[in-house]
Amino acid sequence: MATYDIVLPRLGEAVIEATLTRWLKKEGDTVNEEDPIAEIATDKVDTEVTSPVAGVFAKQLAAEGDVIPVGQIIATLEVKDEGRGTKDEGRGTKDEGRGTKDEIDSKVAFQAEESSKEAPEVADSCEVPSGHEDLPHDHDEGGTRFYSPLVRSIAVQENISFQELGSIPGTGKNDRLTKQDLLNYVEKRKASPPPLPAQSQVSQGLTHSPTDQVIEMDRVRQLIATHMVKSVQTSPHVTSFIEVDMTPIVRWREKHKDSFFQREGMKLTYTPIIIEAIAKAVRDVPMINVSVDGTRVLVHKRINVGMAVALPNSNLIVPVIRDADQKSLLGITKMVNDLADRARQNKLVPDEIAGGTVSLTNLGSFGTLMGTPIINQPQAAIVAIGSITKRPVVIETPEGDTIGIRLMMFLSVTFDHRVVDGAMAGEFLNKMVGHLETFDTNQTL
């Protein structure tokens, strides 16, 4: 029997480590090719590590809860030599195939150090490779100190803010805060707790009756909660509304949706049409497609539209349609369906939910007419669409005005008032309405 090393795989351009949340195989278990052996988590997604070969699970080299750098060995399998040659012949020597342990450790350390150093540069450059734009979420508000997914998770559980994290001394490389550093701080904090802020004092005073159900937030919901609170604290939110006549688009979709499903095996929804209109409107009003870095405004050249997807467990995730302005309506439609399907199956990778520059949320799918969503930081705008409903409206004709029944929809854009003003938001919405109401109903997908 030979041995096969399973390493933590590359999870995305901006991800250098992950937390091992659960082992799915134990020592002595039979492992088939592509069998999941462990569950891992980043601050973006949960996913599984699968085995590329069949064999017997020999040894776990990490414990549940450990933060593991990309490329580190997490387990070994015993595999048959037959048909594979020796370990050196079948996979290359350890030095040739993966590098020595020192080289791997050095490489991982270098990546961590460089990510920490370059985070501020990543934030203010719109030409960096996709996926790097969200690195500041892994750092403190100044973007200077890196925090691992496990450290951030513990901080959320213990209600420790980014400002408080920044005050805790770290014993890791480059003053990095380790899990043990944070646990030690938590113990001291519990021994002499600081005064609770006003909001926490109110929460601590809440009482509930025996009939109330108490539900603990899961890890993803805690991250969402932290992200939403930070967004409201960061950006002054303002929302503008407008109406759009969707009658021609609704009729076009009704005409083509069945044949499209038969040919492509997927639904034809309104979401790709709205995303196409957002991308066109962003080209018309590029200052909507920005982020704020201190006193600097970062104007993104790429138009990457994030779309909010509701998950079966009531959580939310925002996969990204990259370069939406460069894709055809058919291309956007296929990507929307693919990302939404894999999001609900928990099969997205971190890069697919990173790098968005403007977002869309579809409130209409739940029957809501209009809404004021929270901005997905570090973006400056999020578009919301309501349900399409029949309403009597004034129709202008060459013979004069008349009243007719039309299929109308409310559009809104919530924007960061530090950098986007009402006039710009209004111009953006009017451009969207123009693109939607002049939609080419003669086209086919």
Image (spheres, rainbow, N blue to C red):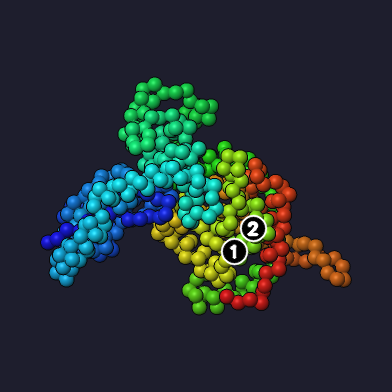
Residue 48, image x, y percentages: 33, 56
Q: Residues within 10 Å of mark 1 (few under 14, many from 20)?
A: many
Residue 284, image x, y percentages: 68, 59
Give the labeled residue for mark 1.
325
Q: Residue at x 20, y 66 (%)?
A: 90
Q: How far apart are the alpha carbons under marks 2 and 1?
A: 9 Å
Query: How many tags in the picture?
Result: 2
Q: Residue at x 17, y 62 (%)?
A: 87
Q: Residues within 10 Å of mark 2 (few under 14, many from 20)?
A: many
User: Pointer 2 and pointer 1: residues touching (CB < 8 Å)?
Assistant: yes
N-terminal label among 2 and 1:
2
The reply to whether residue 444 is visible in this rendering is yes
Give the quadrant of residue 404: bottom right
Q: Residue at x 64, y 73 (%)?
A: 252
Q: Residue at x 38, y 55 (%)?
A: 11
Q: Secondary structure at mark 1?
A: helix
56 relative to 168 in the view: left or right? left
Q: Which quarter shows the N terminus?
A: bottom left
Residue 79, image x, y percentages: 17, 62
328 relative to 249 in the view: left or right? left
Which disc number belongs to residue 282?
2
